[in-house]
Image (cartoon, rainbow, N blue to C red):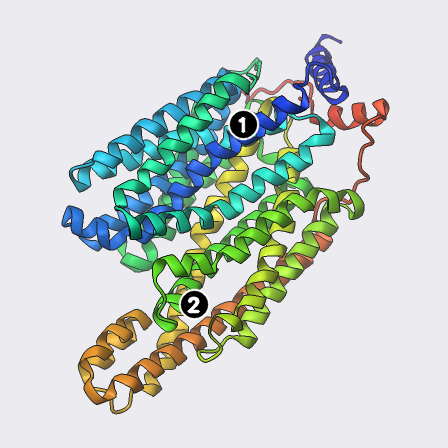
Amino acid sequence: MSTNQPARAAVAEASDTAHGEGVPDARQLRTILIAVCVALMAVIASVSGLNVAQPDLAIAFDASQSTILWIINIYTLTLAALLLPLGAIGDRLGRKPMLITGLAVFGVASAIAVLAPSAEVMLAARLLSGVGAAMIMPITLAVITSTFPQEERGRAIGVWTGVAGGGGILGMFLSAALVDVASWRYLFVLPIVLVVVALGMALRSVPNSREHSGHPFDTVGALTSVVAVVGLIFVLQEGPERGWSAPATLVSLAVGLIATVCFVAWELRRRDAALLDVRLFSERGLAGGSITLLTVFGVQAGIFVVLFPFFQAVLGWSGLLSTLALMPMAVLMMMASGLAPKLAVRIGPRSTMATGILLAGIGLALMAVIVSVDGGYLSILPGMLAMGIGMGLSMTPSTEAITSSLPRERQGVASALNDVTREFGTALGVALLGALLSAGYRGAIGDRLDGIPHGAADAAREGVANAVEAANGAGSHRQALVHAARQSFVDGWQQAMWAGVAVMGALLLYILARGPKNTSPVPADDPEAAETVVSRRAPRPQRPSGGAG
Protein backbone atom coordinates (compact mmCIF):
# COMPACT_ATOMS: atom_id res chain seq x y z
CA MET A 1 0.00 0.00 0.00
CA SER A 2 2.71 2.46 0.98
CA THR A 3 4.65 1.89 -2.20
CA ASN A 4 1.83 3.50 -4.16
CA GLN A 5 1.64 6.69 -2.12
CA PRO A 6 4.33 8.63 -4.03
CA ALA A 7 2.59 7.80 -7.29
CA ARG A 8 -0.76 8.90 -5.88
CA ALA A 9 0.74 12.15 -4.63
CA ALA A 10 2.21 12.80 -8.05
CA VAL A 11 -1.14 12.01 -9.68
CA ALA A 12 -2.84 14.46 -7.31
CA GLU A 13 -0.25 17.13 -8.09
CA ALA A 14 -0.60 16.55 -11.83
CA SER A 15 -4.39 16.53 -11.50
CA ASP A 16 -4.32 19.89 -9.72
CA THR A 17 -2.29 21.26 -12.62
CA ALA A 18 -4.71 19.84 -15.16
CA HIS A 19 -7.68 21.42 -13.35
CA GLY A 20 -6.00 24.80 -13.11
CA GLU A 21 -5.18 24.93 -9.38
CA GLY A 22 -1.88 26.61 -8.74
CA VAL A 23 -1.37 27.26 -12.45
CA PRO A 24 -0.11 30.75 -13.40
CA ASP A 25 -2.68 33.01 -15.03
CA ALA A 26 -2.78 33.62 -18.78
CA ARG A 27 -0.59 36.73 -18.58
CA GLN A 28 2.11 34.97 -16.58
CA LEU A 29 1.99 31.98 -18.92
CA ARG A 30 2.63 34.28 -21.88
CA THR A 31 5.56 35.86 -20.05
CA ILE A 32 6.98 32.43 -19.18
CA LEU A 33 6.69 31.34 -22.82
CA ILE A 34 8.38 34.50 -24.09
CA ALA A 35 11.17 34.16 -21.50
CA VAL A 36 12.04 30.56 -22.37
CA CYS A 37 11.79 31.23 -26.12
CA VAL A 38 14.14 34.22 -25.87
CA ALA A 39 16.59 32.04 -23.91
CA LEU A 40 16.24 29.29 -26.52
CA MET A 41 16.81 31.79 -29.33
CA ALA A 42 20.13 32.82 -27.76
CA VAL A 43 21.29 29.18 -27.73
CA ILE A 44 20.05 28.33 -31.25
CA ALA A 45 21.45 31.49 -32.85
CA SER A 46 24.88 30.68 -31.44
CA VAL A 47 24.87 27.25 -33.09
CA SER A 48 24.88 28.58 -36.64
CA GLY A 49 25.92 32.22 -36.28
CA LEU A 50 29.68 31.78 -36.58
CA ASN A 51 29.40 29.89 -39.87
CA VAL A 52 28.98 33.20 -41.73
CA ALA A 53 32.13 34.68 -40.12
CA GLN A 54 34.71 31.97 -40.87
CA PRO A 55 36.94 34.17 -43.10
CA ASP A 56 36.82 37.03 -40.59
CA LEU A 57 37.79 34.73 -37.70
CA ALA A 58 40.68 33.26 -39.70
CA ILE A 59 42.05 36.75 -40.39
CA ALA A 60 41.50 38.08 -36.86
CA PHE A 61 43.26 35.17 -35.16
CA ASP A 62 45.64 34.19 -37.98
CA ALA A 63 44.16 30.70 -37.55
CA SER A 64 43.95 27.65 -39.79
CA GLN A 65 40.68 26.33 -41.18
CA SER A 66 40.90 23.41 -38.77
CA THR A 67 41.09 25.78 -35.78
CA ILE A 68 38.14 27.80 -37.07
CA LEU A 69 36.06 24.65 -37.44
CA TRP A 70 36.91 23.71 -33.86
CA ILE A 71 35.80 27.16 -32.67
CA ILE A 72 32.47 26.48 -34.36
CA ASN A 73 32.08 22.79 -33.50
CA ILE A 74 33.26 22.74 -29.88
CA TYR A 75 30.11 24.63 -28.90
CA THR A 76 27.79 22.01 -30.45
CA LEU A 77 29.90 19.14 -29.15
CA THR A 78 29.79 20.43 -25.56
CA LEU A 79 26.10 21.25 -25.81
CA ALA A 80 25.15 17.79 -27.09
CA ALA A 81 27.37 15.95 -24.59
CA LEU A 82 26.02 17.68 -21.47
CA LEU A 83 22.31 17.89 -22.31
CA LEU A 84 21.23 14.65 -20.61
CA PRO A 85 23.28 15.03 -17.38
CA LEU A 86 22.44 18.71 -16.90
CA GLY A 87 18.79 18.15 -17.79
CA ALA A 88 18.59 15.49 -15.06
CA ILE A 89 20.41 17.74 -12.56
CA GLY A 90 17.94 20.52 -13.36
CA ASP A 91 15.07 18.17 -12.53
CA ARG A 92 16.61 17.50 -9.11
CA LEU A 93 17.99 20.89 -8.08
CA GLY A 94 15.21 22.99 -9.56
CA ARG A 95 14.52 24.16 -13.09
CA LYS A 96 14.46 27.88 -12.37
CA PRO A 97 17.87 27.93 -10.62
CA MET A 98 19.34 25.85 -13.44
CA LEU A 99 17.89 28.18 -16.09
CA ILE A 100 19.18 31.30 -14.32
CA THR A 101 22.62 29.78 -13.76
CA GLY A 102 22.80 28.67 -17.38
CA LEU A 103 21.86 32.15 -18.62
CA ALA A 104 24.55 33.69 -16.39
CA VAL A 105 27.22 31.25 -17.62
CA PHE A 106 26.18 31.74 -21.23
CA GLY A 107 26.21 35.53 -20.89
CA VAL A 108 29.68 35.59 -19.29
CA ALA A 109 31.03 33.24 -21.99
CA SER A 110 29.60 35.47 -24.74
CA ALA A 111 31.21 38.52 -23.14
CA ILE A 112 34.58 36.74 -23.10
CA ALA A 113 34.11 35.88 -26.78
CA VAL A 114 33.45 39.54 -27.64
CA LEU A 115 36.83 40.49 -26.17
CA ALA A 116 38.79 37.33 -27.08
CA PRO A 117 42.35 38.30 -28.12
CA SER A 118 43.32 34.88 -29.48
CA ALA A 119 41.95 31.65 -30.88
CA GLU A 120 42.74 29.86 -27.61
CA VAL A 121 40.61 32.28 -25.58
CA MET A 122 37.84 32.01 -28.16
CA LEU A 123 37.91 28.19 -27.90
CA ALA A 124 37.60 28.44 -24.12
CA ALA A 125 34.73 30.91 -24.43
CA ARG A 126 32.88 28.66 -26.87
CA LEU A 127 33.40 25.66 -24.58
CA LEU A 128 31.94 27.62 -21.67
CA SER A 129 29.07 28.76 -23.90
CA GLY A 130 28.31 25.12 -24.65
CA VAL A 131 28.10 24.37 -20.91
CA GLY A 132 25.70 27.27 -20.39
CA ALA A 133 23.63 26.27 -23.41
CA ALA A 134 23.32 22.69 -22.11
CA MET A 135 21.92 24.11 -18.88
CA ILE A 136 19.45 26.35 -20.71
CA MET A 137 18.11 24.32 -23.61
CA PRO A 138 16.48 21.32 -21.89
CA ILE A 139 15.11 23.51 -19.09
CA THR A 140 13.26 25.82 -21.51
CA LEU A 141 11.09 22.95 -22.75
CA ALA A 142 10.85 21.35 -19.28
CA VAL A 143 9.46 24.61 -17.87
CA ILE A 144 6.72 24.52 -20.50
CA THR A 145 5.78 20.88 -20.00
CA SER A 146 5.79 21.16 -16.19
CA THR A 147 4.04 24.55 -15.95
CA PHE A 148 1.43 24.82 -18.70
CA PRO A 149 -1.92 23.08 -18.15
CA GLN A 150 -2.85 20.19 -20.43
CA GLU A 151 -5.11 22.25 -22.69
CA GLU A 152 -2.43 24.92 -23.27
CA ARG A 153 0.65 22.72 -23.41
CA GLY A 154 0.45 21.69 -27.07
CA ARG A 155 0.23 25.26 -28.31
CA ALA A 156 3.15 26.34 -26.13
CA ILE A 157 5.26 23.42 -27.37
CA GLY A 158 4.35 24.46 -30.92
CA VAL A 159 5.77 27.95 -30.31
CA TRP A 160 8.90 26.48 -28.70
CA THR A 161 9.35 24.08 -31.63
CA GLY A 162 8.96 26.91 -34.13
CA VAL A 163 11.73 28.87 -32.42
CA ALA A 164 13.94 25.76 -32.23
CA GLY A 165 13.40 24.98 -35.92
CA GLY A 166 13.38 28.45 -37.46
CA GLY A 167 15.65 30.14 -34.94
CA GLY A 168 18.79 28.82 -36.61
CA ILE A 169 17.84 30.46 -39.91
CA LEU A 170 16.93 33.72 -38.19
CA GLY A 171 20.22 33.56 -36.30
CA MET A 172 22.18 33.08 -39.53
CA PHE A 173 20.41 36.04 -41.14
CA LEU A 174 21.07 38.37 -38.20
CA SER A 175 24.66 37.13 -37.98
CA ALA A 176 25.28 37.76 -41.68
CA ALA A 177 23.81 41.25 -41.35
CA LEU A 178 26.03 42.04 -38.35
CA VAL A 179 29.15 40.77 -40.12
CA ASP A 180 28.32 42.80 -43.23
CA VAL A 181 27.53 46.10 -41.49
CA ALA A 182 29.69 45.90 -38.37
CA SER A 183 32.13 43.27 -37.09
CA TRP A 184 32.11 39.56 -36.30
CA ARG A 185 32.49 40.45 -32.62
CA TYR A 186 28.94 41.78 -32.66
CA LEU A 187 27.79 38.20 -33.22
CA PHE A 188 28.28 37.71 -29.47
CA VAL A 189 26.58 40.96 -28.49
CA LEU A 190 23.24 39.64 -29.78
CA PRO A 191 23.25 36.58 -27.43
CA ILE A 192 24.20 38.86 -24.51
CA VAL A 193 21.18 41.07 -25.21
CA LEU A 194 18.91 38.02 -25.47
CA VAL A 195 20.34 36.59 -22.24
CA VAL A 196 19.74 39.85 -20.34
CA VAL A 197 16.13 39.98 -21.54
CA ALA A 198 15.50 36.30 -20.75
CA LEU A 199 17.19 36.61 -17.34
CA GLY A 200 15.03 39.58 -16.31
CA MET A 201 11.82 37.85 -17.38
CA ALA A 202 12.80 34.49 -15.85
CA LEU A 203 13.60 36.00 -12.46
CA ARG A 204 10.16 37.65 -12.32
CA SER A 205 7.88 35.07 -13.92
CA VAL A 206 9.27 31.54 -14.29
CA PRO A 207 8.11 29.30 -11.41
CA ASN A 208 10.42 26.74 -9.88
CA SER A 209 9.77 23.02 -10.07
CA ARG A 210 11.93 20.04 -9.29
CA GLU A 211 11.94 16.26 -8.85
CA HIS A 212 11.81 14.64 -5.43
CA SER A 213 13.63 11.38 -6.14
CA GLY A 214 14.31 8.55 -3.74
CA HIS A 215 17.26 7.39 -5.87
CA PRO A 216 20.82 8.75 -5.95
CA PHE A 217 21.91 10.56 -9.09
CA ASP A 218 22.99 8.16 -11.84
CA THR A 219 26.61 9.31 -12.08
CA VAL A 220 27.78 6.30 -14.11
CA GLY A 221 24.96 6.79 -16.60
CA ALA A 222 25.76 10.49 -16.88
CA LEU A 223 29.46 9.90 -17.55
CA THR A 224 28.91 7.11 -20.09
CA SER A 225 26.33 9.25 -21.90
CA VAL A 226 28.87 12.08 -22.18
CA VAL A 227 31.53 9.76 -23.61
CA ALA A 228 29.05 8.19 -26.04
CA VAL A 229 27.76 11.51 -27.36
CA VAL A 230 31.24 13.06 -27.66
CA GLY A 231 32.56 10.01 -29.51
CA LEU A 232 29.70 9.78 -32.01
CA ILE A 233 29.29 13.53 -32.63
CA PHE A 234 33.08 13.85 -33.11
CA VAL A 235 32.90 11.19 -35.84
CA LEU A 236 30.12 13.03 -37.66
CA GLN A 237 31.82 16.42 -37.36
CA GLU A 238 35.40 15.38 -38.14
CA GLY A 239 34.82 12.43 -40.49
CA PRO A 240 34.28 14.58 -43.61
CA GLU A 241 37.34 16.72 -42.75
CA ARG A 242 39.82 14.07 -41.57
CA GLY A 243 38.51 11.16 -43.64
CA TRP A 244 36.19 8.36 -42.56
CA SER A 245 39.06 5.87 -42.35
CA ALA A 246 41.44 8.18 -40.43
CA PRO A 247 42.72 6.72 -37.12
CA ALA A 248 41.14 9.51 -35.04
CA THR A 249 37.77 8.92 -36.72
CA LEU A 250 37.86 5.16 -36.22
CA VAL A 251 39.00 5.42 -32.59
CA SER A 252 36.27 7.94 -31.85
CA LEU A 253 33.67 5.70 -33.50
CA ALA A 254 34.80 2.70 -31.44
CA VAL A 255 34.78 4.68 -28.19
CA GLY A 256 31.35 6.12 -28.96
CA LEU A 257 29.79 2.75 -29.81
CA ILE A 258 31.31 0.99 -26.78
CA ALA A 259 30.13 3.79 -24.48
CA THR A 260 26.65 3.61 -26.00
CA VAL A 261 26.42 -0.13 -25.37
CA CYS A 262 27.66 0.37 -21.79
CA PHE A 263 25.16 3.18 -21.24
CA VAL A 264 22.21 1.06 -22.42
CA ALA A 265 23.32 -1.97 -20.36
CA TRP A 266 23.80 0.16 -17.23
CA GLU A 267 20.47 1.95 -17.64
CA LEU A 268 18.66 -1.38 -18.06
CA ARG A 269 20.27 -2.53 -14.83
CA ARG A 270 19.28 0.66 -12.99
CA ARG A 271 15.67 0.41 -14.22
CA ASP A 272 13.59 3.07 -12.41
CA ALA A 273 16.72 4.67 -10.92
CA ALA A 274 18.24 5.22 -14.37
CA LEU A 275 19.22 8.60 -15.80
CA LEU A 276 17.16 7.64 -18.87
CA ASP A 277 14.85 4.63 -18.72
CA VAL A 278 15.73 3.09 -22.10
CA ARG A 279 12.81 0.66 -21.74
CA LEU A 280 10.55 3.55 -22.71
CA PHE A 281 11.86 3.36 -26.28
CA SER A 282 9.57 0.37 -26.75
CA GLU A 283 6.66 2.82 -26.57
CA ARG A 284 5.35 4.25 -29.83
CA GLY A 285 5.42 7.86 -28.72
CA LEU A 286 9.03 8.06 -27.59
CA ALA A 287 10.41 5.94 -30.43
CA GLY A 288 8.34 7.60 -33.16
CA GLY A 289 8.99 11.12 -31.92
CA SER A 290 12.73 10.55 -31.56
CA ILE A 291 13.14 8.94 -34.99
CA THR A 292 11.08 11.67 -36.64
CA LEU A 293 13.09 14.50 -35.07
CA LEU A 294 16.38 12.75 -35.86
CA THR A 295 15.39 12.40 -39.52
CA VAL A 296 13.71 15.77 -40.01
CA PHE A 297 16.53 17.77 -38.44
CA GLY A 298 19.05 15.68 -40.34
CA VAL A 299 17.37 16.45 -43.65
CA GLN A 300 17.03 20.14 -42.72
CA ALA A 301 20.71 20.46 -41.84
CA GLY A 302 21.71 18.54 -44.97
CA ILE A 303 19.58 20.86 -47.10
CA PHE A 304 21.41 23.89 -45.74
CA VAL A 305 24.70 22.26 -46.77
CA VAL A 306 23.31 22.09 -50.29
CA LEU A 307 21.54 25.45 -50.40
CA PHE A 308 24.38 27.76 -49.40
CA PRO A 309 26.81 26.68 -52.15
CA PHE A 310 23.91 26.92 -54.61
CA PHE A 311 23.14 30.50 -53.59
CA GLN A 312 26.75 31.66 -53.30
CA ALA A 313 28.71 29.69 -55.92
CA VAL A 314 26.00 28.94 -58.50
CA LEU A 315 23.90 32.12 -58.23
CA GLY A 316 26.76 34.35 -57.02
CA TRP A 317 24.88 35.77 -54.04
CA SER A 318 26.37 37.27 -50.87
CA GLY A 319 26.10 35.56 -47.48
CA LEU A 320 23.44 38.04 -46.34
CA LEU A 321 21.31 37.55 -49.46
CA SER A 322 21.73 33.77 -49.18
CA THR A 323 20.40 33.71 -45.61
CA LEU A 324 17.58 36.07 -46.61
CA ALA A 325 16.60 33.55 -49.30
CA LEU A 326 15.97 30.97 -46.54
CA MET A 327 13.53 33.19 -44.67
CA PRO A 328 10.35 32.08 -46.51
CA MET A 329 11.04 28.49 -45.46
CA ALA A 330 11.81 29.56 -41.88
CA VAL A 331 8.64 31.66 -41.59
CA LEU A 332 6.42 28.86 -42.91
CA MET A 333 8.15 26.36 -40.62
CA MET A 334 7.44 28.52 -37.58
CA MET A 335 3.83 29.14 -38.63
CA ALA A 336 3.22 25.44 -39.27
CA SER A 337 4.75 24.56 -35.89
CA GLY A 338 2.19 26.83 -34.24
CA LEU A 339 -0.70 25.34 -36.23
CA ALA A 340 0.34 21.71 -35.71
CA PRO A 341 -1.28 21.33 -32.24
CA LYS A 342 -4.69 22.41 -33.64
CA LEU A 343 -4.34 19.95 -36.51
CA ALA A 344 -3.31 17.21 -34.08
CA VAL A 345 -6.51 17.79 -32.11
CA ARG A 346 -8.56 17.29 -35.27
CA ILE A 347 -6.80 14.36 -36.94
CA GLY A 348 -4.44 13.04 -34.26
CA PRO A 349 -0.65 13.35 -33.74
CA ARG A 350 0.31 10.41 -35.97
CA SER A 351 -1.70 11.75 -38.91
CA THR A 352 -0.25 15.23 -38.35
CA MET A 353 3.30 13.86 -38.29
CA ALA A 354 2.61 11.77 -41.41
CA THR A 355 1.19 14.79 -43.25
CA GLY A 356 4.25 16.85 -42.40
CA ILE A 357 6.65 14.10 -43.45
CA LEU A 358 4.78 13.64 -46.73
CA LEU A 359 4.91 17.38 -47.50
CA ALA A 360 8.63 17.54 -46.66
CA GLY A 361 9.28 14.58 -48.97
CA ILE A 362 7.30 16.29 -51.75
CA GLY A 363 9.38 19.42 -51.19
CA LEU A 364 12.61 17.45 -51.62
CA ALA A 365 11.25 15.81 -54.79
CA LEU A 366 10.28 19.22 -56.20
CA MET A 367 13.79 20.54 -55.56
CA ALA A 368 15.27 17.49 -57.27
CA VAL A 369 13.03 17.72 -60.36
CA ILE A 370 12.76 21.46 -60.97
CA VAL A 371 16.21 22.75 -59.95
CA SER A 372 18.36 24.23 -62.70
CA VAL A 373 21.13 26.77 -63.08
CA ASP A 374 19.06 28.93 -65.42
CA GLY A 375 15.93 28.67 -63.25
CA GLY A 376 17.83 30.05 -60.26
CA TYR A 377 16.04 30.73 -57.00
CA LEU A 378 12.54 30.27 -58.40
CA SER A 379 13.38 26.69 -59.41
CA ILE A 380 13.87 25.68 -55.77
CA LEU A 381 11.42 28.00 -53.99
CA PRO A 382 8.32 25.73 -54.30
CA GLY A 383 10.27 22.83 -52.79
CA MET A 384 11.60 25.03 -49.97
CA LEU A 385 8.07 26.20 -49.10
CA ALA A 386 6.68 22.66 -49.04
CA MET A 387 9.59 21.57 -46.86
CA GLY A 388 9.05 24.44 -44.42
CA ILE A 389 5.38 23.55 -43.93
CA GLY A 390 6.08 19.83 -43.71
CA MET A 391 8.86 20.16 -41.16
CA GLY A 392 6.82 22.50 -38.99
CA LEU A 393 3.87 20.08 -38.95
CA SER A 394 6.05 17.09 -38.06
CA MET A 395 8.28 18.66 -35.39
CA THR A 396 5.67 19.81 -32.86
CA PRO A 397 3.78 16.49 -32.41
CA SER A 398 7.13 14.66 -32.37
CA THR A 399 8.39 16.88 -29.55
CA GLU A 400 5.15 16.44 -27.60
CA ALA A 401 5.30 12.66 -28.13
CA ILE A 402 8.74 12.59 -26.48
CA THR A 403 7.89 14.84 -23.53
CA SER A 404 4.59 13.08 -22.82
CA SER A 405 6.35 9.69 -22.66
CA LEU A 406 8.19 10.62 -19.46
CA PRO A 407 6.55 11.67 -16.17
CA ARG A 408 6.31 15.33 -15.16
CA GLU A 409 9.19 15.17 -12.68
CA ARG A 410 11.56 13.88 -15.39
CA GLN A 411 10.81 16.60 -17.94
CA GLY A 412 14.39 17.89 -17.86
CA VAL A 413 15.54 14.48 -19.07
CA ALA A 414 12.71 14.30 -21.62
CA SER A 415 13.61 17.73 -22.97
CA ALA A 416 17.31 16.84 -23.04
CA LEU A 417 16.54 13.67 -24.99
CA ASN A 418 14.57 15.76 -27.46
CA ASP A 419 17.53 18.14 -27.84
CA VAL A 420 20.15 15.39 -28.12
CA THR A 421 18.08 13.80 -30.89
CA ARG A 422 18.05 17.11 -32.77
CA GLU A 423 21.81 17.55 -32.39
CA PHE A 424 22.52 14.03 -33.61
CA GLY A 425 20.17 14.50 -36.55
CA THR A 426 21.85 17.77 -37.50
CA ALA A 427 25.35 16.29 -37.40
CA LEU A 428 24.23 13.16 -39.26
CA GLY A 429 22.44 15.12 -41.99
CA VAL A 430 25.38 17.46 -42.59
CA ALA A 431 27.78 14.52 -42.84
CA LEU A 432 25.67 12.25 -45.06
CA LEU A 433 23.93 14.67 -47.42
CA GLY A 434 27.13 16.70 -47.67
CA ALA A 435 29.02 13.53 -48.64
CA LEU A 436 26.36 12.62 -51.23
CA LEU A 437 26.52 16.11 -52.74
CA SER A 438 30.32 15.99 -52.94
CA ALA A 439 30.32 12.49 -54.47
CA GLY A 440 27.68 13.45 -57.02
CA TYR A 441 29.56 16.62 -57.95
CA ARG A 442 32.89 14.83 -58.40
CA GLY A 443 31.26 12.07 -60.43
CA ALA A 444 29.58 14.55 -62.75
CA ILE A 445 32.37 17.08 -63.31
CA GLY A 446 35.04 14.60 -64.44
CA ASP A 447 33.63 14.25 -67.97
CA ARG A 448 33.12 18.01 -68.31
CA LEU A 449 36.75 19.05 -67.83
CA ASP A 450 38.11 18.05 -71.24
CA GLY A 451 40.31 20.84 -72.55
CA ILE A 452 40.46 22.68 -69.21
CA PRO A 453 44.04 23.47 -68.00
CA HIS A 454 45.33 20.85 -65.57
CA GLY A 455 45.66 23.14 -62.55
CA ALA A 456 42.21 24.66 -62.93
CA ALA A 457 40.68 21.21 -63.52
CA ASP A 458 42.23 19.84 -60.32
CA ALA A 459 40.88 22.80 -58.35
CA ALA A 460 37.43 22.33 -59.88
CA ARG A 461 37.26 18.73 -58.69
CA GLU A 462 37.51 19.96 -55.07
CA GLY A 463 34.16 21.74 -55.18
CA VAL A 464 32.02 24.29 -56.96
CA ALA A 465 33.40 27.24 -54.95
CA ASN A 466 36.96 26.16 -55.82
CA ALA A 467 35.98 25.90 -59.48
CA VAL A 468 34.52 29.42 -59.57
CA GLU A 469 37.66 30.80 -57.94
CA ALA A 470 39.98 28.85 -60.27
CA ALA A 471 38.03 30.08 -63.30
CA ASN A 472 39.50 33.56 -62.81
CA GLY A 473 42.89 32.18 -63.87
CA ALA A 474 41.62 29.87 -66.62
CA GLY A 475 41.75 32.48 -69.39
CA SER A 476 39.54 31.61 -72.36
CA HIS A 477 38.29 28.51 -70.55
CA ARG A 478 36.74 30.54 -67.75
CA GLN A 479 33.15 30.38 -68.98
CA ALA A 480 33.35 26.67 -69.80
CA LEU A 481 34.78 25.84 -66.37
CA VAL A 482 32.13 27.82 -64.49
CA HIS A 483 29.37 26.25 -66.56
CA ALA A 484 30.75 22.74 -65.97
CA ALA A 485 31.03 23.30 -62.22
CA ARG A 486 27.55 24.72 -61.84
CA GLN A 487 25.91 21.97 -63.90
CA SER A 488 27.84 19.32 -61.95
CA PHE A 489 26.70 20.87 -58.69
CA VAL A 490 23.09 20.58 -59.82
CA ASP A 491 23.71 16.91 -60.65
CA GLY A 492 25.10 16.34 -57.15
CA TRP A 493 22.21 18.35 -55.71
CA GLN A 494 19.69 16.05 -57.37
CA GLN A 495 21.44 12.96 -56.04
CA ALA A 496 21.31 14.36 -52.48
CA MET A 497 17.65 15.38 -52.85
CA TRP A 498 16.55 11.94 -54.08
CA ALA A 499 18.38 10.36 -51.15
CA GLY A 500 16.42 12.68 -48.87
CA VAL A 501 13.17 11.64 -50.58
CA ALA A 502 14.01 7.98 -49.94
CA VAL A 503 14.74 8.68 -46.27
CA MET A 504 11.50 10.62 -45.81
CA GLY A 505 9.57 7.86 -47.59
CA ALA A 506 10.96 5.26 -45.19
CA LEU A 507 10.12 7.51 -42.24
CA LEU A 508 6.56 7.97 -43.50
CA LEU A 509 6.01 4.20 -43.69
CA TYR A 510 7.42 3.77 -40.18
CA ILE A 511 5.20 6.49 -38.68
CA LEU A 512 2.10 5.11 -40.39
CA ALA A 513 2.88 1.69 -38.95
CA ARG A 514 4.45 2.50 -35.57
CA GLY A 515 3.89 6.20 -34.90
CA PRO A 516 2.10 7.64 -31.85
CA LYS A 517 -1.53 6.62 -31.67
CA ASN A 518 -4.17 9.07 -32.84
CA THR A 519 -5.66 9.61 -29.39
CA SER A 520 -8.69 11.78 -28.94
CA PRO A 521 -8.15 15.22 -27.39
CA VAL A 522 -8.92 15.70 -23.71
CA PRO A 523 -11.74 18.18 -23.07
CA ALA A 524 -10.62 20.88 -20.66
CA ASP A 525 -13.85 20.58 -18.68
CA ASP A 526 -13.78 16.79 -18.31
CA PRO A 527 -12.17 16.03 -14.91
CA GLU A 528 -12.22 12.26 -15.36
CA ALA A 529 -10.53 12.42 -18.76
CA ALA A 530 -7.96 14.90 -17.49
CA GLU A 531 -7.18 12.69 -14.51
CA THR A 532 -6.72 9.71 -16.84
CA VAL A 533 -4.22 11.64 -18.95
CA VAL A 534 -2.19 13.06 -16.09
CA SER A 535 -2.05 9.70 -14.35
CA ARG A 536 -0.10 8.41 -17.32
CA ARG A 537 2.44 11.18 -16.68
CA ALA A 538 2.84 10.35 -13.00
CA PRO A 539 5.87 8.31 -11.90
CA ARG A 540 5.36 4.58 -11.78
CA PRO A 541 5.37 2.83 -8.41
CA GLN A 542 8.85 1.71 -7.46
CA ARG A 543 9.53 -1.97 -7.95
CA PRO A 544 12.14 -3.92 -6.02
CA SER A 545 15.25 -4.36 -8.13
CA GLY A 546 18.43 -5.93 -6.97
CA GLY A 547 20.40 -4.15 -9.70
CA ALA A 548 19.23 -0.64 -8.89
CA GLY A 549 22.04 0.21 -6.55
Q: Quadrant of residue 399?
A: top right
Q: Which mark is residue 436?
A: 2
* Residue 286, horizontal then vertical, whole percent: 63, 40
Q: Would you place residue 220 above or below residue 418 in this image?
A: above
Res 411 seen here: no
Q: Residue at x 70, y 15 (%)?
A: 13
Q: Position of residue 485 (x, y in %)?
A: 34, 78
Q: What's the amino acid at mark 2?
A: Leu
In the drawing, does residue 254 fall left or right of residue 144?
left
User: Dividing the picture into quarters, in which one does residue 532 lie?
Assistant: top right
Q: Which mark is residue 412?
A: 1
SS type, badge 1? helix
Q: Is residue 444 above or below residue 539?
A: below
Residue visible at 70% across and 56% down?
355
Identify the image quadrant of residue 83: top left
- With 474 as the anchor, is 147 left or right in this view? right
Left or right: residue 352 versus residue 157 is right
